Image: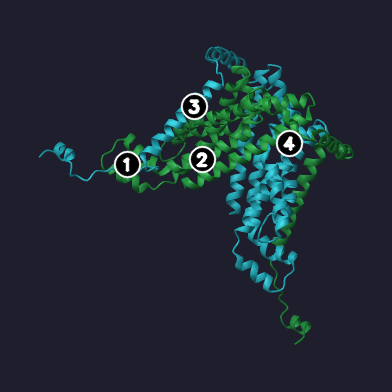
Chain colours: A cyan, B green
């Protein structure tokens, strides 16, 4: 019997690939549903294929005008970049400070139910809306400029950090809480001697991560007039100064890359 | 033995930090405060804007209440378009991010050069915000959902690629070796050794990114890249605050639902 005959014999135990979804009907059903969805959505979006084709020469034109990047107006670039960094730093610090009370109020094992629900509602509400939507409201209330940008980033950082703190506190082993409570410690003492040592490393790590995220976001709130490099970028785009836009984009990528590098180094150090 | 006697007998006092540590700690605080002061003072913030902020905010809220529910019918189509932009963008980025993730994982890439190229693509994609990608694609394709879909896709590549690449680097090498030992080709190793191990992560990240993308696609309209953002932007510019509040309510609902759906799906996958 040759080897090819063995494999064709019916009684050889077969091997089937391990699938994520065992039931073939469900598996292929999902694929079919996905295909139908793509066809339907592509139909309703009225995608104009001629426009897509027309876009290609336009893209080529744009990229040719982007090169070489124009760093000639570097003083404008540095000013916008510095403003973005300052916005990110200020927002991270204030966000950290505001996140501590909000995070504690959002931990179900520390505070009464109404306080918990209110804090959680606040966190969810500010997390749902995109930074740019929040920025528009702050621009309306505080006028154009970096103040609106800083406040936007503060709201975003506070909700992010406080959610992390609240989850960290909730995941603490109840024994430690009980032990400190059993000594008759008051609530502030509980916070200092039990919650702080437990959550501080994570809190610092999350804050550093948030600083890095804030640098990324500070480059974009400027599009609605909330200051920073985003404002310069949006202006350069609307004036078709594509070579300057590319210079700004390169600077942003470099800065974000550096920020990410530093933040991951610090987080490793904290761990 | 009274406390004073005890202190005399055992002069060594336990302290949590040594003097050097204390000094360093306070130095750290000083630097932090210094950075905060530098950042805030050089931003040259107009503090007097705070004086009438509460009046402005109150004014805004009275104008926004009650939401204009008649506006609902105009809202429906852009809302569906927003969801389409997010979903199609995620699907596109899924297919683009997949090969790039294999390029940027150390154990599946070809050589250092390809690894570097993969990493570079991921970093670039991630550092440019979705809205900035939107600006770019609007300049290319003209305003409309097409620009939005590509903006979402290009931003998601970095996110999904990074997480999937990390998952690939953490796979069980034993399985790969076992498949290699059967004489499988490179492609077969990929298909039967690596892919089954990372598929849950791939689907999980895609669903997770989808829910972030729903949130992002609500503002893409501000730069003309389609979706409900166009409507929101024009309502704000026309000071139709009652329409704005209805749009915000809808966005809130859709984002909450998508977050819920994505969490439920991810729980089932893992």
Residue A193: give x, y in percent of width and height.
69, 66
Q: Secondary structure at mark 4?
A: helix
Work out whether mark 1 precedes mark 3 in sequence or the reverse, and give the earlier one: 1
Work out whether mark 4 precedes mark 1 in sequence or the reverse, and give the earlier one: 1
Looking at this view, name the residue that lies furthest to the left.
Answer: A1
Residue that mark 1 sits on: A17
Pointers 1 and 3 in contact (C-beta within 8 Å): no
Residue that mark 3 sits on: A38
Callout 2 and callout 3 share a chain: no
Residue that mark 2 sits on: B205
Q: Could you give the CA–CA distance between mark 2 and mark 1, rounded to whole angstroms?
A: 23 Å
Q: Nearer the viewer, mark 1 or mark 3?
A: 3
Residue that mark 4 sits on: A134
| Mark 1 neighbour density, 10 Å: few (under 14) some (14–19) many (20 or more) | few
Q: Secondary structure at mark 1?
A: loop
Which residue appears at 64% of the width and 71% of the height? A179
């Amino acid at each position: 019997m040759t080897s090819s005959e063995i494999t064709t014999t019916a009684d050889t135990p077969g091997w089937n690939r391990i699938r994520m979804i065992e039931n073939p009907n469900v598996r292929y059903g999902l694929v079919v549903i996905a295909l139908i969805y793509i066809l339907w959505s592509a139909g309703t979006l009225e995608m104009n294929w001629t426009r897509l084709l027309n876009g290609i020469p336009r893209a080529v034109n744009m990229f040719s005008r982007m090169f070489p990047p124009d760093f000639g107006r570097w003083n404008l670039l540095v000013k916008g970049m510095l403003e973005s960094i300052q916005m990110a730093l200020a927002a991270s610090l204030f966000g950290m400070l505001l996140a501590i009370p909000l995070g504690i109020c959002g931990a179900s094992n520390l505070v009464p139910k109404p306080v918990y629900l209110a804090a959680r509602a606040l966190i969810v509400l500010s997390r749902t809306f995109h930074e740019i939507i929040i920025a528009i409201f702050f621009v309306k209330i505080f006028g154009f400029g970096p103040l609106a940008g800083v406040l936007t980033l503060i709201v975003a950082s506070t909700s992010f950090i406080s959610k992390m703190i609240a989850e960290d506190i909730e995941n603490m082993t109840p024994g430690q809480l009980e032990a400190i409570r059993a000594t008759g410690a008051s609530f502030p003492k509980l916070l200092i001697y039990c919650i702080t040592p437990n959550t501080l490393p994570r809190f610092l790590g999350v804050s550093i991560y948030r600083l890095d995220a804030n640098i990324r976001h500070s480059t974009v709130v400027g599009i609605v007039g909330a200051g920073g490099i985003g404002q310069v970028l949006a202006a350069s785009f609307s004036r078709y100064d594509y070579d300057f836009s590319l210079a700004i984009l390169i600077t942003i990528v470099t800065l974000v890359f550096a920020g990410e590098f530093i933040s991951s180094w610090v987080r490793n150090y904290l761990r | 033995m009274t406390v004073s006697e005890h202190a005399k007998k055992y002069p060594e006092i336990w302290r949590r930090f040594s003097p050097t540590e204390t000094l360093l700690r306070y130095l750290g605080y000083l630097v932090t405060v210094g950075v905060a002061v530098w950042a805030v003072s050089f931003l040259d913030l107009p503090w007097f804007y705070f004086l009438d902020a509460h009046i402005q905010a109150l004014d805004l809220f009275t104008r926004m209440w009650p939401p204009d529910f008649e506006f609902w019918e105009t809202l429906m189509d852009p809302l569906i378009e927003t969801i389409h932009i997010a979903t199609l963008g995620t699907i596109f980025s899924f297919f683009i991010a997949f090969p790039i993730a294999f390029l940027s994982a150390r154990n599946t890439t070809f050589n250092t050069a390809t690894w570097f190229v993969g990493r570079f693509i991921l970093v670039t994609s991630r550092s440019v915000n979705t809205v900035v990608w939107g600006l770019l694609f609007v300049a290319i394709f003209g305003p409309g959902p097409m620009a939005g879909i590509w903006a979402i896709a290009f931003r998601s590549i970095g996110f999904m690629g990074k997480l999937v690449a990390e998952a690939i680097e953490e796979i069980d090498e034993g399985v790969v070796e076992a498949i290699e030992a059967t004489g499988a080709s490179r492609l077969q190793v990929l298909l039967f050794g690596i892919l089954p191990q990372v598929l849950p992560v791939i689907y999980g990240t895609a669903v997770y990114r989808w829910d972030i993308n729903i949130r992002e696609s609500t503002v893409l309209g501000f730069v003309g890249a389609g979706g409900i953002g166009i409507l929101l932007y024009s309502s704000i510019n026309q000071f139709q605050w009652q329409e704005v509040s209805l749009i915000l309510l809808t966005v809130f609902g859709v984002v909450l639902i998508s977050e819920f759906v994505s969490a439920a799906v991810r729980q089932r996958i893992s």
